[in-house]
Image (tube, rainbow, N blue to C red):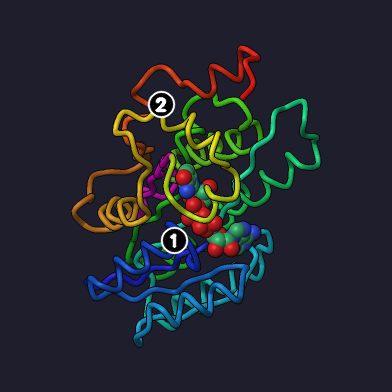
Amino acid sequence: MADKVVITGGASGIGYAVAEKLLAEGGSVCLLDMNGDTLAAARDKLGGERITTGVVDVRNEAALDTQIRNGAEAMGGLTGCVASAGIGHRKTILDGDAEDFARIIAINLTGVYATLRAAAKVMIEQGTGGALVSLASATGVRGCAERAAYGASKAGVINLTEVAALEFAKHGIRVNALCPAPINTPLIAGVQDANVRAEWMQGIPMNRYGEPAEVAELAAFLLSDKASYITGQAVNIDGGWSAAGVQTAATRIAKGAGR
Ligand SMILES: NC(=O)c1ccc[n+]([C@@H]2O[C@H](COP(=O)([O-])OP(=O)(O)OC[C@H]3O[C@@H](n4cnc5c(N)ncnc54)[C@H](O)[C@@H]3O)[C@@H](O)[C@H]2O)c1
């Protein structure tokens, strides 16, 4: 069964890499993204017949529902969905405010809720089951200074993924979360200057950042029947960062050492 997968945030970074991987394996993809320019560029770069695209903001639930439904129709069904749309954010609790916090939650958490919900509804109507993958983060697994809103949104995604796995199991739908850190994408480039990057490097046992293609391998596996008994899991993919026990950057900032 060739994959028929909707990918939010599919115009860039991890979402784009998942599309590239699935297309190489003979699947079809529907890329949804709020950035029409990068979406058009992604479509041109990926090329081929098995791609559809739609411009949508994941905060617009009705439009997202329609786009996911349209994507499924264009592909002749829906076997998977990857909720990769998200934005980076680096601010301490004291430097932020509730409005800014709510903005991050709306995109990174409520947007994933709306995506999983819309895709599950289509799969339940089809009666064929499927697999959903959400993008959480290693910063949602443990506290990380300057990641108040971002980390909270990603911790929420992990719990939401568990709940979705429980509720959708009876429909034959598996749901898993990916917890990457840090991966070389435009998102990371936007929130990390050279100093922050150097600090992060100290906490990564593998001594390098990951690549989007490495995350795509894991997503493709979780979407496939090879992962047929895996659901409700949050899988770290972070070069050992979460296993290290000591977070150099987070600890330094927490102690007030500054940069
Ligand atoms: N890069 C990392 O190190 C890393 C680590 C952990 C988690 N993640 C998560 O992985 C996901 C993908 O991140 P990435 O690094 O590939 O980033 P990216 O910026 O390369 O891609 C994210 C895409 O999402 C789109 N997007 C943003 N807000 C949207 C919205 N409201 N509606 C629709 N589309 C929207 C952007 O236009 C962009 O194309 C995000 O959820 C991110 O939080 C990334």
* Secondary-structure class at tag 2: loop
Disc 2 marks which amino acid?
Answer: Gly
Label 1 is placed on what type of residue?
Answer: Gly
Measured in 3D between alpha carbons, the distance from the residue under mark 1 to the one under mark 2, in whole angstroms, is 25 Å
Mark carried by residue 203: 2
Q: Residue at x 76, y 42 (%)?
A: 100
Mark 1 Cβ and ligand 1 under 8 Å apart: yes
Residue at image position (59%, 56%) is: 114
Observer-nearest of 114 and 23 = 23
* First to last magenta residue range: 165-181
- Quadrant housing residue 212: bottom left
| Residue marked by disc 1 | 15
Split into 4 quadrants, where in the image is the N terminus?
A: bottom left
Which mark sits nearer the N-terminus, 1 or 2?
Answer: 1
On the rendered image, what quadrant is the C terminus found in? Answer: top right
Question: Residue 140: percent from the left, percent from the top?
Answer: 51, 33
The answer to whether 78 is drawn above or below residue 254 in the figure is below
Residue 45 is left or right of residue 140, and the answer is left
Query: Which numbered disc, 1 or 2, marks the residue closer to the eye?
Result: 2
Where's residue 112, x and y in %? 55, 52
Q: Are marks 1 and 2 in contact (CB under 8 Å)?
A: no
Task: Give the vertical position of 229 relative to 144 (above or below).
Answer: below
Taking the magenta stretch, the answer to whether it contains residue 200 is no
Q: Is mark 2 within 8 Å of ligand 1?
A: no
- Residue sitting at 21 percent across and 57 percent down? 225
Q: Is residue 191 visible?
A: yes
Number of labels in the image equals: 2
Residue 2 is left or right of residue 201, and the answer is: left
